[in-house]
Amino acid sequence: MTPLDAPDLSDLLTLPPYGLAAAEKLACLGRILDELTHFHRAHCPAYRRMLEVLGGGAPDESGLAAIPFLPVRLFKDMELLSVERDQVVKTLTSSGTSGQAVSRIFLDRATAALQSKVLARLMGDLLGQQRHPMLVIDTPSVLKDRAAFSARGAGILGFSLFGRDVTYALDDTMQLDLPRIEAFLEKHREAPTLFVFGFTFMVWRHLVQPLAALGRRLPLERGVLLHGGGWKKLADAAVAPAAFRSALADHCGLQRVVDYYGMVEQTGSIYLACERGHLHAPIFSDILIRDPRDFAVLPAGRSGLIEVLSVLPQSYPGHALLTEDLGTLLGEDDCLCGRLGRYFSVERRAPRAEPRGCSDTYAAPA
Amino acid sequence: MTARETYTNIFIESFGVEAGALNESFVYQCVPSWDSVGHMSMIAALEDAFDIALEVDDIVDFSSFTKGIEILAKYGVTV
């Protein structure tokens, strides 16, 4: 490979998404991530200048820790891309509320297609190869402004690839549309699995709470609920993950509730929770936990800032990003669920960070 | 209506274009209406019309008017 080519991921896409043990994964991922550093250095002048200032990473680190990382908020302050502007087919933006800065992520056709393909590998592991009838716990108006929909809209659209007969559970005023949900359930009464998707806070505020207030129960026993976008607002509302799960079981009969961690800056490489509630890094990405004081890599069991590494960012230099989220590495290759790779948990957001993220950006009326 | 007419009409209705524009150079994002939202509603319309369920990879690879014809053939639909 020359620095002019982005790395080829076709081999990686044929492997089981949680099938590489530590040494093999490091060899494979490390090589691709190194290639991406060279590629972005050659194609993104601003990234090259930053590496020159940083001196090319810490010399005493090895493996994934030696790959130079950027703070995720840099994408709010700068437009960083490694392709010509006329190659950009999609621009993703993070939260756009109340004058806060937004991240701008530039995708070319190849990167956008890779994101979908990798997400398809991960979702296949969760839902099988078939697309199931899909209920979105959100309003269709989130996609109305097609020229500039939010991270929330982009997330819904990205996941709707894995559903069919995509039906929105809320109306334009964010009220639960029970007649529409009942018609959906009736239409698909034979379907063995229903795919339910929503952002964590929206599920709580606009599905669980209204059902509780109405004293209603929805028969979603066949559902697999995938939710993400952070616990911050729920933590503020004093809702613990266990209470969230038991409320969903009570009001919707939902037994399979799967949390995910992901961000618009690395769309496609999400971290899905296993049956034990641990978030897992697939073969396409990995995480490191760094000490917020000196950015040293922390061992398992110590809380710190989460760095995310992903093979997907080809059109922008976002393959190694230090987030503002706090997390803890729980282990590697030895989760009782059987998946290989690192697994971790995410805690509340780092205190000095401004609120951001997908569902967090929706301001619910009090 | 022939399968080709159904296929063509779905493109015309989904993307608001003339039949004459539909050829091998009619590709994803060549018109503003064929964005990711338009793509998913076009796929849904095709699935309804031909009573098929596309696999995820085929939805991702459905990148042009011509490529779509190739993909539908995998599902026994000859356009």
Image (cartoon, grey):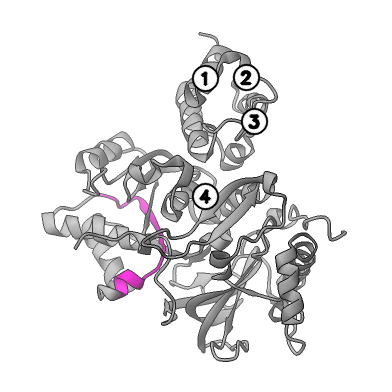
Q: On what subunit does the disc labeled 4 rest?
A: A
The amino acid sitting under disc 1 is Ile
Along the line of sight, the residue nearer the viewer: A86 or B40: A86
Mark seen at residue A128: 4
Element under disc 2: loop
Q: Which residues are magenta?
A: A219-235
Mark 1 vs 4: CB contact within 8 A: no
Depicted A65 relative to depicted A21: above or below: below
Q: Quadrant of the N terminus of chain A?
A: bottom right
* Nearer-the-camera pick, A252 or B14: B14
CB under 8 Å between discs 2 and 1: yes
Residue type marked 3: Val
Residue under label 1 = B12
User: Contact, CB < 8 Å: mark 3 with mark 1?
Assistant: no
Q: Chain of mark 3?
A: B
Badge 4: how crowded within 10 Å, few (<14), some, or many (20+)? few
Q: Residue furthest right?
A: A2
